[in-house]
Amino acid sequence: MNPVLLPVRLYGDEILRTKLKECDVFDPALQAFIPDLVHTMYERDGVGLAANQVGSHFRVFVIDPAWAREDASPNPIVMINPIIESREGEVDNEEGCISLPGIFAYVHRAVRISYSYSDPQGNRLHETAEGFKAVVIQHEYDHLEGIVFTDRIGILAKLKLKRKLNELVARAVNGVNIMEGFPDD
Ligand code: NI
């Protein structure tokens, strides 16, 4: 079956504020969902996408940090039930998010992390990452905790984005804020 392009939930949607619960790696619904998650990340030209950004409650995200490069070929890494075990050093990185179109801000992150996760085959992997990959993992991990990157910026930076953030929130209907028709669908 061909993967499906899932509708992206935007800032103002309650599911982005939901802390996702650990899931069973072998749940057939999760296994069926993963290709759609990966497909949607590439279609939206992201370097990461978390399940709640497309309306799912599975504790999973996909990343492909190299996708930002011109010559990149797809190399998706799916992380189920990830845990960030340690964080070291500091870096300020300009971030954006598929759920916050047109909004960018510098976010303070750890420069090196160690973490564990289950892959879709059920192997528990322990790894370290630094630089951009570490930042992408921290950004996506935040989504699983119900946190978006604008929660981590200073008051002045947030004030500058207030109008754009309010515009996004204004699109929400009964706590649901779907990308369709926005910004250039
Ligand atoms: Ni994001």
Image: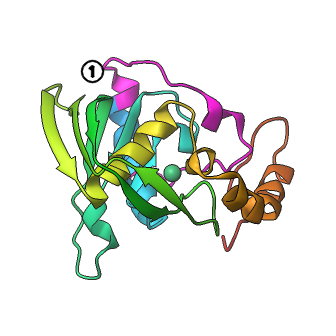
> What is the span of residues highlighted in magenta in the rendered image?
1-30
Is residue 137 positioned above or below 15 on the image?
A: below
Q: Is 18 displayed left or right of 82 in the figure?
A: right
Q: Which residue is painted at 45% across and 42% down in the image?
A: 50
Residue 52 can be seen in this image: yes
Magenta span includes 125? no
- Whether ligand 1 has any atom under 8 Å from the Cβ at mark 1 is answered as no
Amino acid type, mark 1: Phe
Is residue 54 positioned above or below 19 on the image?
A: below
Q: Give whichever of 35, 111 is nearer the camera.
A: 111
Is the C terminus in the top left, top right, bottom left or bottom right quadrant? bottom right
Please identify the quarter of the rendering in which residue 76 is found.
Answer: bottom left
Q: Which residue is painted at 34% across and 71% down in the image?
A: 68
Quickly name the residue at label 1.
26
Please identify the quarter of the rendering in which residue 138 is found.
Answer: top left
Q: Which residue is painted at 82% across and 63% down in the image?
A: 163
